Image (spheres, grey):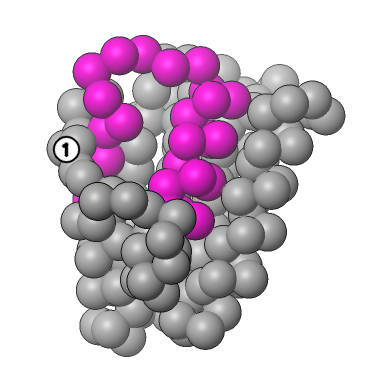
């Protein structure tokens, strides 16, 4: 199952970019044996578009047809890492060809796109900068693959 991380805005070089790239590479190495991956990242530029509806249009163009859709949203459910891993494996085992994880802009994800989601996921009640949300999601995807392979990275 191919995975895609779609996010509003660009992260330039720096510590956040280095962490994202590191976790994406780790996921690709670990996930391959599980039938997960590759994991690619799409950053949509919002200079000419304004607001959640315009961002949703840009994001929607990059969501693969039939993909399991997970939208990160403050109103979503918080889940433990093993449960997140199980959800990812469940989509794969259902025969989904791809899964897409969406991170909206500063004003959140447009309700129409949010309503299409298979899963609404929250990283907790605190508000996080978008760059850190991308790092945390990339890490959780790697952690999920580590859980599914049984490596000692995740200590339960």
Residue 84 coordinates in the image, percent (x, y): 27, 55
Taking the spot 68% from the left edge, 28% from the top edge, the residue there is: 16
Residue 34 painted magenta = no
Say above or below: 117 vs 17.
Answer: below
Say above or below: 138 vs 39.
Answer: above
Residue extending farthest right: 13
Highlighted magenta segment, given as a residue range: 115-143
Taking the spot 68% from the left edge, 59% from the top edge, the residue there is: 25
Taking the spot 43% from the left edge, 67% from the top edge, the residue there is: 151
Observer-nearest of 24 and 101: 24
Observer-nearest of 156 and 101: 156
In the rendered structure, the answer to whether residue 155 lies left or right of residue 18 reads: left
In the rendered structure, the answer to whether residue 142 lies left or right of residue 40 reads: left
Residue 7 coordinates in the image, percent (x, y): 55, 38
The image quadrant that residue 91 belongs to is bottom left
Residue 146 coordinates in the image, percent (x, y): 44, 64
Residue corresponding to mark 1: 77
Q: Is residue 86 visible to the viewer in this orientation of the structure?
A: yes
Residue 119 painted magenta = yes
Taking the spot 63% from the left edge, 71% from the top edge, the residue there is: 29
């Amino acid at each position: 199952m191919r995975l895609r991380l779609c996010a509003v805005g660009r992260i330039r070089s720096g510590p956040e970019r280095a962490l994202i790239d590191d976790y994406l590479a780790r996921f690709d190495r670990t996930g391959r044996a599980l039938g997960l991956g590759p994991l690619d990242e799409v950053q949509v530029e919002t200079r000419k578009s304004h607001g959640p509806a315009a961002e949703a249009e840009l994001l929607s163009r990059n969501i693969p047809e039939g993909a399991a859709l997970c939208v990160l949203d403050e109103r979503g459910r918080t889940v433990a890492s093993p449960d997140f891993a199980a959800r990812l494996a469940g989509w794969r085992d259902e025969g989904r060809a791809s899964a897409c994880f969406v991170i909206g802009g500063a004003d959140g994800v447009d309700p129409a796109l949010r309503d299409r989601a298979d899963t609404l996921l929250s990283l907790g009640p605190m508000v996080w900068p978008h760059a850190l949300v991308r790092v945390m999601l990339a890490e959780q995807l790697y952690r999920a693959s580590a859980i599914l392979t049984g490596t000692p990275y995740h200590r339960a």
